[in-house]
């Protein structure tokens, strides 16, 4: 890479920024402005007019605490390449979690697109740049490690698909139009697991927070919150706040504390975003200090505008039971609209493989797609627990972020004791979530089994799914046989007095199938399945060989 120009220097009014080096003067360049204080700050940009742009930064009071600069040029740079590298640097700096970035959301309007020799700039050349930054102790971790962090995957500077960007812009317009109007306004974004809901929400919230600090914006001085009823996901959002200038940890909350805070103060929030809204409570839960009937309704009442991310196929508790009808009953009381995400963004699986999973979680069993169908995704059935565990460990050694998860068919309490999953087979302990790091990112978790509550909303490279005793096989009709009596999530199955006994039982089966759907759609590169029920395991192995009923 002899063509790469990497120049480090002081960033102050004294140096002359007119460069004799062609790659830093007449070509597009990428630059990093930074300091090395106790809490380091940085700004990352790209420009086609280096001298003018850097002098503008020197006149900007926001940059006055930055005193070092790195200029990066290349004889093959074009503006598509420098935009790409700038965005990559921002995303990886966020994941490295060392600097408070001064960047705001001007990059958030970019969409995924190809350009000439993109793989060269995006992969080969960017790797060289990053390793040079590591040599100079500007950044710490490797690209491979950072790619596996959920803070990287949730970065608000990730390129959006055209559909994601269209929905984001529509929501921003919805907020601008309704901020000054009377009443409460709701916009719902629906999408299956892996359709990019959380990435969209992260990008949207960052932009809203940046606009709230922009005096020229229609959304200036808005008081906004992001709510999520998932403790592991909340850890990731709070890690994001360490790197971004306008996202504050106090604006990231769980639903019940938000409702109680607003009730006590009598305030109304301007814009509230709810990630994983299918986890919201739909009945009173005094144990968790929620004294109302419905989380969503109470949030809407305390917010001018509410943005709801929702997937009814991810409902996991009877006390959080949602369906489209119940959602509509609540939102129709207000000014509301619904938008839908449809593209699978997580799994590198073929349509045939996705179809196989979608049928499986409706209890229908199909022959597995032929291996040549998927060049980038592996769907595999295992005949014994040892080979299953070894396969996941090998993938973790090679790619990282590969974990075993299970249906909630084994006793699991939060009392400090160790509880084992499938003693006669898998024989591994349930997850420990006491760490401040998300469970899947803890290196020790390769020796544990994750529950649905640990991995919901997260990406893995390879996921190994243990189908426990509640998931059996009905030979007569060649379908899954779901037995809720064997499911150990007693909190999830607490019956509701406002529903009939028949409905409570119906929801239990639905919850088990939903949990399987969520678990099976965690893996980017592959899904490995081990069924503890011998008859189901035998049938799945037959289906892997292509045998029909």
Image (cartoon, rainbow, N blue to C red):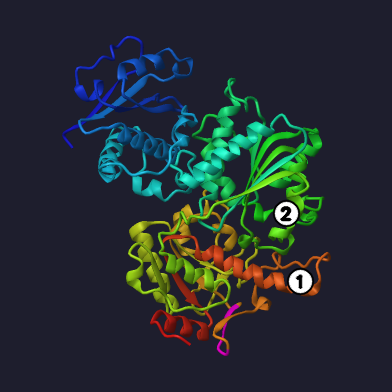
Q: Which label number is shown at residue 523?
A: none
Asked if residue 473 lies in the magenta stretch, the reply is: yes
Q: Determine whether 102 is above or below 317 in the image.
A: above
Task: Name above or below for residue 14 compared with residue 277.
Answer: above
Which part of the image, by quadrant, shows the N terminus? top left
Majority secondary structure of magenta residues: strand
Considering only vertical position in the picture, is 17 above or below 545?
above
Q: CA distance from mark 2 to mark 1?
A: 19 Å
Residue depicted at x 40% and y 40%:
92
SS at circle 1: helix
Q: Position of residue 164 (x, y in %)?
A: 51, 45
Q: Quadrant of residue 82?
A: top left
Q: Which mark is residue 328?
A: 2
Residue 410 picture location, percent across and down: 60, 72
Q: In the image as oriented, which residue stretches furthest toward the left?
A: 2
Asked if one can make out residue 436 in the rendered structure from this viewpoint, the answer is no
Disc 1 packing (10 Å; few <14; some 14–19; many ≥20): few
Q: Kindly tell me whether residue 194 is visible in this rendering.
A: yes
Quadrant of res 67? top left
What numbered label is drawn on residue 503? 1
Q: Nearer the viewer, residue 195 or 58?
A: 195
For mark 2, does the 10 Å Cα neighbourhood hold few (<14), some (14 to 19), or many (20 or more) residues? few
Q: Residue furthest bottom?
A: 476
Query: On the image, which quarter does residue 107 sit in?
Result: top left
Dot 2: element: helix
Question: Which contiguous range is marked in magenta?
Answer: 471-476
Q: Is residue 365 above or below residue 514?
A: below
Judged left or right of residue 132, residue 225 is right
Q: Position of residue 94 (x, y in %)?
A: 45, 38
Of the image marks 2 and 1, the number of the one nearer the N terminus: 2
């Amino acid at each position: 890479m002899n063509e790469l120009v990497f120049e480090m220097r002081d960033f102050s009014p004294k140096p002359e920024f007119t460069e004799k080096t062609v790659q830093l003067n007449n070509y597009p360049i990428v630059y990093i402005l930074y300091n090395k204080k106790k809490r380091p700050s940085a700004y990352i940009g790209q420009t086609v007019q280096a001298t003018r742009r850097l002098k503008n930064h020197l006149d900007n009071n926001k940059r006055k605490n930055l005193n070092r600069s790195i200029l990066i040029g290349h004889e093959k740079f074009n503006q598509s390449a420098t935009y790409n590298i700038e965005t990559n640097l921002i995303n990886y700096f966020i994941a490295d979690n060392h600097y408070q970035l001064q960047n705001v959301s001007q990059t958030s309007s970019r969409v995924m697109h190809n350009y000439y020799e993109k793989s060269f700039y995006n992969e080969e050349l960017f790797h060289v740049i990053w390793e040079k930054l590591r040599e100079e102790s500007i950044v710490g971790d490797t690209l491979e490690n950072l790619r596996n962090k959920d803070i990287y995957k949730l970065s608000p500077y990730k390129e959006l698909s055209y559909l994601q960007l269209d929905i984001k812009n529509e929501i921003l317009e919805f907020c601008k139009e309704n901020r000054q109007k009377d009443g409460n306004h709701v916009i719902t974004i629906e999408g299956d697991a892996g359709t990019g809901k959380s990435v969209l929400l992260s990008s949207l919230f960052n932009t809203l927070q940046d606009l709230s600090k922009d005096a020229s914006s229609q959304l200036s001085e808005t008081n906004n919150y992001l709510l999520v009823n998932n403790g592991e996901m909340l850890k990731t959002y709070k890690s994001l706040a360490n790197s971004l200038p306008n996202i504050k940890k106090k604006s990231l909350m769980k639903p019940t504390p938000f409702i109680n805070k607003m009730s006590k103060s009598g305030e109304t929030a301007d814009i509230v975003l709810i990630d994983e809204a299918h986890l919201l409570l739909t009945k009173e839960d005094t144990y968790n200090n929620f004294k109302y009937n419905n989380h969503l309704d109470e949030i809407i009442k305390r917010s001018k505008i509410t943005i709801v991310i929702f997937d009814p196929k991810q409902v996991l508790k009877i006390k959080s039971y949602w369906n489209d009808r119940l959602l509509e009953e609540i939102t129709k009381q207000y000014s509301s609209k619904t938008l839908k995400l449809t593209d699978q963004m997580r799994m590198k699986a073929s349509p045939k493989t996705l179809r196989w999973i979608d049928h499986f979680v409706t209890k229908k069993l199909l022959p597995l797609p032929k291996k040549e169908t998927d060049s980038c995704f592996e769907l595999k059935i295992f005949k014994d627990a040892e080979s299953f565990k070894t396969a996941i460990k090998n993938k973790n050694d090679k790619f990282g972020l590969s974990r075993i998860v299970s249906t909630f068919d084994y006793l699991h309490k939060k009392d400090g004791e160790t509880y084992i999953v499938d003693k006669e087979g898998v024989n591994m302990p349930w997850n420990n979530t006491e760490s401040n790091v998300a469970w899947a990112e803890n290196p020790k978790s390769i020796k544990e089994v994750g529950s649905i509550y640990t991995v919901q909303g997260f990406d893995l490279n390879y996921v190994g799914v243990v189908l426990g005793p509640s998931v059996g096989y009905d030979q007569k009709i060649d379908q899954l046989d779901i037995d809720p009596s064997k499911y150990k999530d007693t909190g999830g199955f607490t019956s509701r007095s406002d529903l009939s006994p028949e409905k409570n039982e119906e929801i239990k089966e639905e919850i088990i199938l939903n949990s399987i759907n969520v678990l099976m759609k965690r893996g980017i590169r592959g899904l490995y399945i081990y069924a503890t029920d011998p008859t189901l395991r035998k049938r799945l192995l037959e289906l892997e060989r292509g045998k029909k009923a």
